[in-house]
Structures are given as C-alpha cells and as structure tokens.
C-alpha cells in the first residue's frame, strides 16, 4: 500500500481527496498549519472512512519540522494542496503569497529529494491560462503571459519550478493538475468548503447569502457576450476532482505531465443561481452590479487529455453539487446548534 502525504489535507479540496485516497486503499498522512481549515476535519474524515489519518499541525515554511516529519515517515508520494488562494488578498500582500506558496513548495521538494520520495502531484489552477483567444483551455496553450494577480503567478511559477526540477532529477515523477472551479461537498454532509474569513468565490458567497450571513449576492456584470450576459465557468464537483487525484496517482511516470480537471461544460452565474434555487426551494436574493476587474467572460476546460490518459471523467452534475452544498450547510447548522 502506497503511503501518501497530503499537504493542506484539512482544506477543502485536500480533505475530499484524502477521503477518496483512503477509500481507494492508500495510507494517508496530513500536514496543515490550519490557517484556512480546522483540525475537526480529521474527525470528519475518520467518520466517513473509518480510518483516522495521522495529522501534523505544521507549517511547510518550517524546514526543521518538515525534515523531522519526512525522517519519520517514508512517503511514496506527496500531494501538494497547501497554499494561500485568495486572489484579491494576493494583490494586497504579494510577498506573503510568494513566500508561502513558492517557498513551501521548494521546501517540500527538498525534503522529498533528501528522503527519496519521487512522486509529486501539484494543485495548479485554470488561472495559469490567463486570457486566451479562445475560452476552451487546452494543456498545450501558452501559460503565464496574461495572469492578472500574484496568486495566479505563484501557480505559474511553481509549475515552472516543477519542470526545471524534473530536468535535474531523472527519478522525479510529477503531475500538475489544473483545477477549474471546484464546488459542492461530500455527500455525507460532513466536509465541504468552510473558509475562515470573508469568502471571494461564488459558491461560498451563495452559501452565506442563503443562510443570511450576507444579505444578497452581487452578480458581477450581466453585459458580457454570453447568452444571458453573465460570465461562464467550468464548475466541477469536488468529489469528481478528488477522484481525479486518485486516477493521477495511478498514472505517475518520469517527468512532468499536465492535466486540466474540469467538466468541459461552462455554466453562467445566472444558471448557478437557478440551480441553487431549484435545490433549495427558495429564491436567492441577488443584484446585478458592475463587472469585477480582471474577470473573463468565459472559460472552460478541454478535459480530453485527463479523460483519455487518466481514464477519468466527471460524473456529478451542478444539481448534485447544489444538493450536496445544501446538505453540508444543514449539517453545519445542526452541529453548531442553530
Ligand atoms: P483551502 O484553503 O481550503 O486549503 C488549503 C490548505 O492549505 C488550508 O487548510 C491551509 O490551512 C493550508 N496551508 C496554507 N499554507 C500552508 C503552509 N504554509 N503550511 C501548511 N499548510 C498550509 O484551499 P482549497 O480550495 O482546498 O485549495 C487547495 C489547493 O488547490 C490550493 O493550492 C489552491 O490554490 C488550489 N486551487 C484551488 C481552487 C479553488 O477554487 N478552491 C482552484 C484552483 C486551484
Ligand atoms: C465565478 C464567477 C464571477 C463572486 C477564481 C480564481 C481562480 C480559481 C477559481 C483558484 C465569476 C462571479 C463571483 C460574486 C459573482 N481559484 N461572481 N459574484 O473568478 O472563475 O476564479 O476561483 O485557483 O484562480 O480567480 O471564480 O468563484 O471568484 O467567480 O458574480 O460575489 O462568479 O464574476 O464569473 P473565478 P469565482
């Protein structure tokens, strides 16, 4: 049985992937500094899978601690989810983003080299494509050129670091996964997206509007050249995304492979609101406001490569994601006695 380290494993995508990995028979350990997640996620993972993953509360910037952890455990592979991800904040605090995201990756690669761990999966993002002539993104397109924020550039720089490192270390096997827009929650309702602080992404904002923590959703523009005028994105259920990592682990080979993880289908903001209303039986209050700086009218994944090479494809729908999000919200309310 392969032993896996999941950095950022108590976070949103990490926790769902840890569940899928355990259910696929892998032994998993987690490092997270709990900057944007809670230690109780470990209890939830245990409740879902019956297995309690070993958890290190540690910061990847702490090289000594990282060395100790790697010295103790012989990992076969590292899945690197940990990172800061708020686009707006990255514009305000670029150095925090460069230090945290880039230095932590370099530290990890050094620890892997020292202790003979050769397999690496990196959580990259559709953001590396920036603005393209066509909205359907293919892995072979040029990346990096028109990224508008430091967060996105950390993802691009890390992708390049991984490529350089793979040239130097012939035993290194890396997969870079470019996630599109992850949404939804585990069907158990026990884990989901629960960011600390004020969220920036559409679904966490919809969740907060639905339970009254935010009065209404502001829809950023309805004058885009799309059918209903609102932006279109490729929203992927987080459980499908998590399963993409299990498929990737089964297809590691020397060098770097890059895959988009998306559905291949775009959905507009208005369609997202409609789907949420259908799942909740309520009307989400929203208002059309001006465009958000840097937003693209539409982008979605060409997921052919992941479909063909990894034998993976998405199975869940937007309606499934909305149902699971509402179920998760209800579980959270019950847990907090509301
Ligand atoms: P998340 O914030 O829920 O999870 C990231 C976790 O990393 C958090 O639990 C945080 O506490 C931890 N962390 C951050 N810095 C750390 C450090 N220095 N040491 C240890 N732990 C640290 O985010 P997520 O949505 O699960 O995203 C996971 C990864 O996927 C991130 O790298 C993110 O950039 C990337 N990604 C996310 C999205 C998205 O929309 N959610 C899209 C594309 C890519
Ligand atoms: C989705 C759509 C908004 C909030 C970001 C990052 C990207 C990646 C995914 C990590 C857009 C609209 C949103 C609101 C709205 N993350 N919207 N009102 O912009 O596709 O990508 O998350 O890598 O790097 O940039 O996702 O969830 O912010 O927005 O109308 O209050 O919802 O305009 O069309 P985005 P998002």
Image: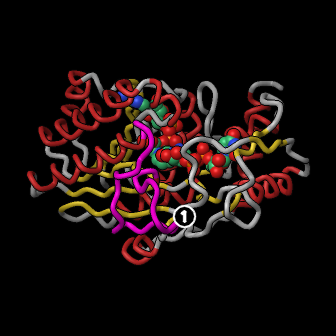
Q: Nearer the viewer, residue 338 or 172?
A: 172
Quadrant where the C terminus sits is: top right
Left or right: where does residue 300 sit relative to residue 159?
right
Left or right: where does residue 209 sit relative to residue 194?
right
Left or right: where does residue 277 sit relative to residue 187?
right
Left or right: where does residue 116 sit relative to residue 324?
left
Q: In the rendering, at what x and y percent does residue 9 appear? A: 45, 39
Give above or below for 103 relative to 74: above
Q: Is residue 147 magenta?
A: yes
Q: Nearer the viewer, residue 256 or 67?
A: 256
Q: Which residues are magenta?
A: 127-151
Q: In which quadrant of the rendered view does residue 41 lie?
A: top right
Give above or below for 222 relative to 336: below
Quadrant where the N terminus sits is: bottom left
What residue is drawn where x is 86% and y is 57%? 278
Q: Is residue 138 magenta?
A: yes
Residue on which disc 1 sits: 300
Q: In the rendering, at what x and y percent does residue 320 appear? A: 71, 60
Q: In which quadrant of the rendered view does residue 31 lie?
A: top left
Q: Is most of the magenta stretch helix, strand or loop?
A: loop
Q: In the rendering, at what x and y percent does residue 322 appear? A: 74, 53
What residue is drawn where x is 21% and y is 21%? 64
Query: How are the colours assigned in the image?
Result: secondary structure
Task: Inspect this view and state whether residue 41 appears.
Answer: yes
Q: Nearer the viewer, residue 13 or 55?
A: 13
Does the numbered disc 1 mark a residue whose Cβ is under 8 Å from ligand 2?
no
Q: Considering the numbered disc 1 on the image, is that residue within a helix, a strand or a loop?
A: strand
Which residue extends farthest bottom? Answer: 308
Q: In the rendering, at what x and y percent does residue 56 appear? A: 38, 27
Task: Inspect this view and state whether residue 184 appears.
Answer: no
What residue is drawn where x is 78% and y is 31%? 333
What residue is drawn where x is 33% and y is 52%? 121
């Amino acid at each position: 049985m392969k032993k896996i380290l999941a950095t950022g494993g108590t976070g949103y995508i990490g926790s769902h992937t840890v569940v899928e990995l355990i259910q696929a028979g892998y032994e998993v350990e987690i490092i997270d500094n709990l900057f944007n997640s809670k230690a109780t996620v470990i209890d939830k993972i245990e409740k879902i899978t019956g297995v309690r993953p070993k958890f290190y509360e540690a910061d990847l910037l702490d090289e000594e601690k990282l060395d100790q952890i790697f010295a103790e455990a012989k990992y076969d592979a590292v899945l690197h989810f940990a990172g800061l991800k708020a686009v707006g904040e990255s514009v305000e605090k670029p150095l925090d983003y460069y230090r945290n995201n880039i230095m932590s990756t370099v530290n990890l690669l050094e620890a892997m080299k020292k202790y003979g761990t050769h397999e690496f999966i990196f959580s990259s993002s559709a953001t590396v494509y920036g603005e393209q002539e066509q909205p359907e993104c293919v892995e072979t397109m040029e990346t990096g050129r028109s990224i508008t924020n430091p967060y996105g550039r950390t993802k691009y720089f890390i992708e390049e670091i991984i490529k350089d490192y793979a040239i130097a270390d012939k035993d290194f096997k890396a997969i870079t996964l470019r996630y599109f827009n992850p949404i939804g929650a585990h069907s158990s309702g026990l884990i989901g997206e629960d960011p600390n602080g004020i969220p920036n992404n559409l679904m966490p904002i919809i969740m907060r509007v639905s339970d009254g923590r935010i009065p209404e959703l502001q829809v950023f523009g309805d004058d885009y050249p799309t059918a209903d005028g609102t932006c279109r994105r490729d929203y992927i259920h987080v459980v499908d995304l998590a399963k993409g990592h299990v498929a990737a682990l089964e297809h590691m080979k020397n060098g770097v492979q890059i895959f988009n993880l998306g559905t291949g289908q775009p959905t507009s903001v208005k369609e997202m609101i409609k789907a949420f209303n259908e799942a909740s039986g309520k009307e989400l209050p929203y208002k059309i406001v001006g465009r958000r700086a840097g937003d693209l009218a539409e982008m979605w994944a060409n997921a052919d490569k992941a479909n063909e090479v990894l034998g993976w494809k998405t199975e869940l729908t937007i309606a499934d994601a909305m149902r699971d999000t509402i179920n998760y919200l209800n579980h959270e309310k019950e847990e907090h006695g509301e």
